[in-house]
Image (cartoon, helix red, strand yellow):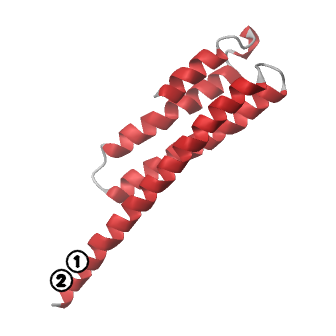
């Protein structure tokens, strides 16, 4: 959630004509990350949860692209964009590790189920 708050603060000084453009896109992408994680957590299976984590990761990559664009066109100080991109990369690593853990857990559960059917 910190990333979403940081993006809202970051975009406050963007030109007003971007409210429905890049500002809105960046804010939606940033809010989508924790929203997808939360929605996925409420699902019945780890497989479904992983799907929502993948969607969160996609929103994160979308946000990174938008941060780079905002810096490139001069809407903000590149150092501020870099700070947020580092935050995105850190979250992406956590999501990737979490997805890998869920997948391993799912494979382990599937293997145990197959083994019990063989006995």
Q: Is residue 75 above or below residue 106?
A: above
Q: Is residue 68 left or right of residue 99?
A: right
Q: For residue 48, what is the image quadrant?
A: bottom left
When the figure is inspected, residue 20 is found, relative to residue 44, above or below; the finding is above
- Check contact, mark 2 vs mark 1: CB within 8 A: yes
| Disc on res. 113 | 1
Secondary structure beneath disc 2? helix
Q: Helix or strand or loop: what does disc 1 sit on?
A: helix
- The residue shown at (37%, 45%) is 40
Q: Is residue 117 left or right of residue 2?
A: left
Is residue 56 among what the camera can see?
yes
Horizontal and vertical percent position of residue 57: 54, 46
Task: Tell me where residue 117 appears, x and y as whole percent.
Answer: 19, 85
Q: Position of residue 11 (x, y in %)?
A: 65, 17
Which residue is most to the bottom? Answer: 119
Q: Residue at x 43, y 34 (%)?
A: 35
Dividing the image into 4 quarters, which one contains the C terminus? bottom left
Give the residue number, with chain letter if any, for mark 2: 116
CA–CA distance in space, label 2 to label 1: 5 Å
Q: Is residue 54 visible?
A: no
Residue farthest left in this picture: 119
Circle count: 2
Location of residue 114 in the rendering, given as x and y in whole percent from the top left corner: 25, 82
Q: Residue furthest right?
A: 73
Q: Residue at x 48, y 26 (%)?
A: 2
| Residue depicted at x 67% and y 18% | 20
């Amino acid at each position: 959630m910190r990333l979403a708050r940081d993006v809202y603060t970051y975009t406050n000084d963007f030109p007003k004509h971007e409210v429905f453009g890049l500002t809105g896109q960046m804010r939606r992408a940033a809010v989508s990350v924790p929203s997808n994680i939360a929605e996925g957590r409420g699902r019945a299976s780890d497989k479904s949860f992983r799907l929502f984590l993948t969607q969160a990761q996609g929103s994160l990559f979308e946000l990174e692209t938008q941060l780079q664009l905002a810096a490139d066109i001069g809407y903000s100080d590149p150092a501020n964009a870099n700070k947020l991109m580092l935050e995105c990369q850190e979250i992406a690593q956590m999501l990737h590790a979490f997805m890998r853990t869920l997948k391993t857990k799912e494979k382990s559960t599937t293997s145990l189920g197959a083994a019990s059917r063989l006995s």
